[in-house]
Every structure is written in C-alpha cells, then in structure tokens.
Amino acid sequence: MAARFSVARAARQLTSSVARRQSPFACKLQAQQLLHQRLFTVSAAVREKKYTEDHEWIEASADGKTFTLGISEYAAKALGDVVYVELPEVGLEATAGDAIGAVESVKSASDILSPIGGTVTEVNSELEEKPGALNKDPEGNSWIAKIEISGEPEGKLMSKEEYSAFTDDA
C-alpha cells in the first residue's frame, strides 16, 4: 500500500513539473509578443496628439524633431464654414505663442498660434485652394504646417481626454 502512494506521489510531481515547464517555442513566441507590445506602446506615446487652450493641436513626427500643427475639430465647428486660410511662409522662424497664420470663416476670423518655437518646414498648400477641407478633416489631412522645433513646447498642452473636458466646460 505504501508503495502505491509513493508511485502516485512521484507521478503527481512529474506531471506538475512538466506542466510548469513551457516548450522553447512557447517562450520565444511570448517574448516576441512582449517585444511587439512594448514597441507599440512606446511609439503610440511618442506620437500622441496634444492640444492647446487656443484650440490648436500638435503631433510629433517619427524623428521627434518635427511637429505637425493644425486646428481642432472643436475650433473647426465653432468657426463654421471656412472660406480662407492664410498659411505661414516656409522658413518662417516662430516662437511659442506667435501668430503664424489665420483662418477666416463666414462667422469670424481667428489667428493660428504656434504652441512651439521653431522653423516652418512645410505648409499644406491644398488649403489655399480648398479652405473648406479644414471643416471636413481638421485633425487629419487638413493640417496647417510642419514645424521643426528649436526647443520644448511651451504653454499648457493637453491630452485628448483633458482637451475634451476643457471644451465641455467652455
């Protein structure tokens, strides 16, 4: 009877140690999944869109030195139908808070303020021909300018959630 219990105990120990040990393939697969998860979350945090109290947004490019600037959906809705966009000149040196352009609509006009200091490297010239595109996709293809930064962004920059709370209070 004692021999039967020791054989059963040995069998349990053997099966439990085998169950705990994973195959080398499973370990490699889990390591690859973990690697991909880490890279994805890091790149998502770097490219997160930030918003200002003046209703502009900026988003860093992959190199981290160039930022894309545009107006928020909230601003586009508040302006109404956009009829004219004054774009900054390529090569313009701007400091944070400078007016680098303007947006005119049937309701009003508003300056485009740069939340970052730097040099304008590119503008979205499509907006000169089709200013109404700014109403259709203000936070996507209807960006205003790309700016190569010369310092850190200044002023209060908000995440999407913080900006939504900010505009809900307005």
Image: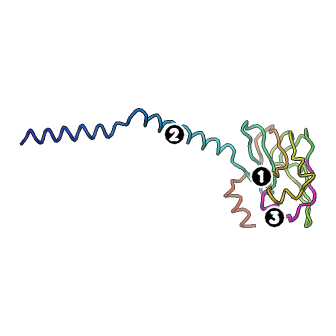
Q: In the drawing, does residue 6 fall left or right of residue 57?
A: left
Horizontal and vertical percent for residue 155? 77, 50
Q: In the drawing, does residue 12 fall left or right of residue 23?
A: left
- Which residue in the structure is indicated by mark 1? 140
Tag 3: residue type? Lys
Q: Residues within 10 Å of mark 1 (few under 14, many from 20)?
A: few
Of residues 94 and 79, which is closer to you in this image? 79
Quick check: is 157 in the magenta stretch?
no
Quarter of the picture holding the N terminus: top left
Residue 44: quarter of image:
top right
Outermost residue toward the top in this view: 24
Secondary structure of the residue carrying tag 3 is helix
Work out whether mark 1 precedes mark 2 in sequence or the reverse, and give the earlier one: 2
Residue 131: quarter of image:
bottom right
Mark 2 vs mark 3, CA separation in Å: 41 Å
Q: Which residues are magenta?
A: 72-87
Horizontal and vertical percent for residue 70? 81, 51
Q: In the drawing, does residue 41 fall left or right of residue 147?
A: left
Tag 1: residue type? Gly
Work out whether mark 3 precedes mark 1 in sequence or the reverse, and give the earlier one: 3
Of residues 38 and 12, which is closer to you in this image? 12
Secondary structure of the residue carrying tag 1 is loop
- Which residue in the structure is indicated by mark 2? 34
- Which residue in the structure is indicated by mark 3? 77
Quarter of the picture holding the C terminus: bottom right
